[in-house]
Amino acid sequence: MKFPRNADIWFGPYLKSRLRKVARRTKPKRAWVAIADHYEPLGMGATVETALGRVAEWREMWPRIAGDAPRDAAGQSPQYTFFYPQEEYRRDLLDSIAEMVRLGIADVEVHLHHHDEQRDLLIEKVSEYCGRLTGGHGLLRQQDGRTAFGKLSALKTASTFLGSSSGRSSLLFLHTKICEVLRHCIGCRDQLAPSQHVQL
């Protein structure tokens, strides 16, 4: 059998290094579960009254759902992320969601419906909307003096949300699923060392 050139010099250390890496492999220390929604309270042609009712339902039920759910290794409740669409901006709708953010059980990110916009117009739209969310409601995060955010883009025809006429049953279904996922992940703690607790 013919070995590669200079194998007598490098093959031994290479093999030792590979074996060390295999021996050090451990199970993942963290599991991340993302809960997010195209949240469109005015979606499907809803009236402002209907939209306010949808937001009020979330404001009433989500704190209870988050409070009942298992906490992560750092003691944090689940946080629901509302990707809130720019064109549905209304102060009265965002105020209740901002209250949940201040309670530490929710977050808001940028949801932008757009189609064929030029670069400058898109930057202007995103900047203006981020300004409204930060200045008007204290939402989004600041990092190194700049606004940091996640952005969801969708074509104008997209319309997906849990704020429908069956909103209460959607929330109850979500509550069940969140608890199942969190209990499953947190149930792993018994097999993990203290420094390896699952964080969600």
Image (spheres, grey):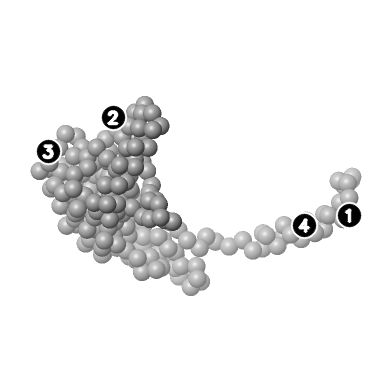
Q: Which one is earlier in the sequence, the residue at label 1 or at label 4? A: 1
Residue 153 versus residue 142: which sits nearer the camera? 142
User: Is residue 38 something that shows in the picture?
Assistant: no
Which of label 2 and label 1 is nearer to you?
2
Which of the 4 image quadrants contains residue 198?
Answer: bottom left
Residue drawn at (76%, 60%) of the image: 16
Q: Are marks 3 and 2 in contact (CB under 8 Å)?
A: no
Residue drawn at (33%, 52%) of the image: 140
Task: Give me the C-alpha separation between circle 2 and circle 1.
Answer: 64 Å
Q: Position of residue 81 (x, y in %)?
A: 31, 51
Residue drawn at (38%, 28%) of the image: 118
Task: Give me the C-alpha separation between circle 3 and circle 2.
Answer: 19 Å
Q: In the displayed structure, would residue 81 be above or below residue 158?
A: below
Name the disc covering residue 157, or none. Answer: 2
- The amino acid beneath tag 3 is Thr
Q: Which one is earlier in the sequence, the residue at label 2 or at label 1? A: 1
Q: Residues within 10 Å of mark 2 (few under 14, many from 20)?
A: few
Using residue 20 as the reference point, say whether residue 132 is left or right of it: left
Q: Secondary structure at mark 1?
A: helix
Judging by the rendered image, the residue that carries numbered circle 1 is 8
Q: Secondary structure at mark 2?
A: loop
- The amino acid beneath tag 1 is Asp
Residue drawn at (36%, 60%) of the image: 182
Q: Which one is earlier in the sequence, the residue at label 3 or at label 2? A: 3
Task: Give me the C-alpha separation between circle 2 and circle 4.
Answer: 56 Å
- Considering the image in quadrants, where does the C terminus appear? bottom left
Q: Are marks 1 and 3 in contact (CB under 8 Å)?
A: no
